[in-house]
Image: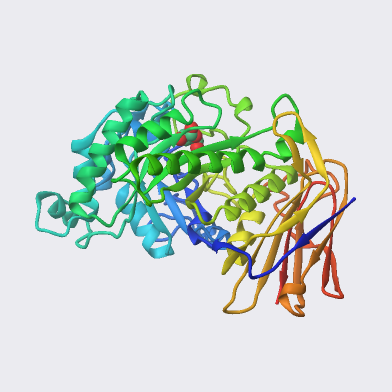
């Protein structure tokens, strides 16, 4: 099969938003404890962070980190996680039925973000708690006057406020599983009140209202509309969450699930713009896609099946090449919406459906899905281009007819660098993709890396950590045409200059 793409730097979607390459650190399973943070690990630094994981986090290139949850935040007392470590309480986290030792908290997280040059995104508990505690937390983190809360912060080792611009007003409050779950009108009012109060401290904050936990939930669309009708003037973004897995073994639809993410973004944008239209406003609300990934939820027995433990092994999915191709295609979708997606966070960073896996006291390694993320974060620079793609189509059960080749490209006017990212979403058809570069002059090929294995179910493990990794692909430039050979189930990063 063959496909063609026309690429011209004159056709621009928008600047590459670096916040698309965010991650998520939840107090869940082993994401924090024995994931990024393990004071007894041989590679741990003086702050208790694993050095081997820190190196992988840098290579991954995450720009933003959302914290502390997730469902966890809806039962969290932020006060438990500050102050002398030995005095912090052991609590039962009801979201994941885990014992939370609170040895990691706001100081550990925000100081780590500063050291690693990662932008923090904090979520407040609007489940079991509300406005009063959210305001106190905001003052604790951002206050710079002489107050009881800022004195407490200083006594805990931090005189200066941290710089936290992004705040999530709760987590998945639309989900019946959420502690303190709300009806749309209840959440709308609360979000408006919290946003209103937060703006009094700092009108420049970027506030994220909860949107829908998935596109299939009954309240999708209504939830966004009702929330934004109440809080439109006060918030900047509305969240969207999506996790994908093959349903009933349907790999064809799974490989095409970036289509669902694409439609999800378009629908949230349309709803937000509808509210803007009704209000006669030119304000544009951004989409905060602050949880997304492949997650084999069907393998998870549910929270109530979990024994109550410290740092349990929960949802430690081991990803295949096929999963990596899906993750690469989801990143392509996010880039294609760089003009409206304000933030995106892959959930989560380590062990819990993470690109990085660890053994307690032992090794750390890259899952297959690490690779498309790291390559995209490193090489998608400048502007996202609007491509003209002519591709054969694939018929899918869940998403209808979709393009076999799913692609985007970036162009950096400062350096002239061009990066083409594409996925062949067919399970069995190889394809040759001809990219017309005539708009670019006479570029040269710098590198072509692909994520592909003959057997798409290959995985990386502690003993075989590099089984799936990017390797050279086959491509050539002739007469201004870049030809990329894309085998079935493959993801590509082709760089030109
Ligand atoms: O990332 C795992 C969980 O998925 C989060 O805690 C929750 O927000 C979502 O349902």
Asked if residue 87 can be seen in this view, the reply is: no
Would you say 285 lies left or right of 312 here?
A: left
Q: Residue furthest top?
A: 304
According to the image, what is the colour scheme of the structure?
rainbow
Compared with residue 450, is residue 266 higher up or lower down, i.e. above or below? above
Q: Quadrant of the C terminus?
A: bottom right
Q: Residue furthest right?
A: 1
Residue at the image point whose x is 54% and y is 32% from the top? 215
Residue at the image point whose x is 13% and y is 54% from the top? 151
Residue 473 x, y percent position in the rendering: 82, 62
Q: As rendered, which of 4 and 43 lies closer to the eye?
A: 4
Q: As rendered, which of 161 and 488 lies closer to the eye?
A: 488
Residue 3 x, y percent position in the rendering: 83, 54
Would you say 408 lies left or right of 457 here?
A: left
Would you say 335 lies left or right of 185 here?
A: right
Residue 144 x, y percent position in the rendering: 16, 59
Asked if residue 299 can be seen in this view, the reply is: yes
Q: As rendered, which of 293 and 285 lies closer to the eye?
A: 285
- Label count reads 0
Q: Quadrant of residue 260?
A: top right
Q: Quadrant of residue 98?
A: top left
Residue 480 x, y percent position in the rendering: 82, 74
């Amino acid at each position: 099969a063959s496909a063609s793409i026309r690429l011209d730097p004159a056709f621009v979607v928008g600047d590459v938003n670096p916040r698309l390459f965010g991650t998520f650190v939840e107090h869940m399973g082993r994401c924090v404890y024995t994931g990024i943070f393990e004071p007894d690990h041989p590679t741990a630094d003086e702050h208790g962070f694993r050095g081997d994981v820190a190196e992988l986090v840098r290579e991954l290139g995450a720009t933003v980190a959302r914290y502390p949850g997730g469902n966890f935040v809806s039962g969290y007392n932020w006060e438990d996680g500050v102050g002398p470590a030995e005095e912090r309480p052991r609590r039962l986290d009801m979201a994941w039925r885990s014992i939370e030792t609170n040895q990691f908290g706001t100081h550990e997280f925000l100081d780590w973000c500063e050291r690693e040059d990662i932008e923090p995104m904090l979520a407040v508990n609007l489940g079991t708690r509300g406005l009063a505690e959210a305001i106190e937390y905001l003052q604790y983190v951002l206050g710079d006057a002489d107050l009881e809360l800022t004195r407490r912060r200083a006594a805990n080792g931090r005189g200066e406020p941290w710089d936290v611009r992004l705040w999530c007003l709760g987590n998945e409050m639309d989900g019946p599983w959420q502690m303190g779950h709300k009806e749309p009108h209840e959440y709308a009012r609360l979000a408006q009140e919290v946003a209103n109060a937060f703006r009094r401290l700092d009108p420049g904050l970027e506030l994220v209202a909860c949107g829908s936990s998935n596109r299939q939930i009954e309240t999708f669309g209504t939830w966004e509309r009702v929330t934004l009708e109440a809080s439109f003037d006060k918030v900047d973004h509305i969240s969207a969450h999506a996790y994908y897995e093959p349903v009933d073994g349907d790999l064809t639809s799974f490989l095409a699930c970036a289509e669902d993410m694409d439609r999800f973004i378009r629908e949230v944008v349309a709803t937000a713009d509808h509210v803007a239209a009704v209000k006669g406003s030119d304000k544009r609300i951004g989409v905060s896609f602050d949880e997304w990934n492949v997650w084999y939820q069907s393998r998870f027995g549910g929270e109530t099946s979990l024994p109550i433990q410290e740092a349990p092994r929960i949802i430690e999915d081991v990803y295949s090449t096929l999963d990596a191709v899906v993750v690469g295609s989801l990143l392509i979708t996010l880039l294609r919406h760089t003009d409206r997606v304000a933030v995106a966070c892959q959930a989560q960073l380590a062990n819990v459906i993470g690109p990085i896996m660890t053994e307690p006291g032992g090794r750390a390694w890259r899952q297959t899905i690490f690779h498309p993320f790291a390559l995209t974060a490193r090489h998608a620079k400048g502007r996202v281009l609007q491509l003209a793609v002519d591709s054969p189509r694939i018929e899918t059960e869940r998403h209808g007819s979709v393009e076999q080749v799913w692609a985007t490209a970036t162009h950096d006017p400062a350096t002239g660098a061009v990066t083409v990212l594409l996925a062949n979403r067919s399970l069995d058809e190889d394809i040759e993709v001809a990219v017309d570069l005539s708009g670019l002059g006479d570029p040269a090929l710098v590198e072509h890396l692909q994520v592909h294995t003959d057997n798409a179910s290959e995985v990386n493990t502690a003993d075989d950590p590099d089984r799936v990794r990017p390797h050279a692909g086959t491509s050539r430039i002739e007469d201004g045409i870049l030809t990329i050979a894309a085998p079935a189930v493959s993801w590509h990063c082709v760089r030109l200059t």
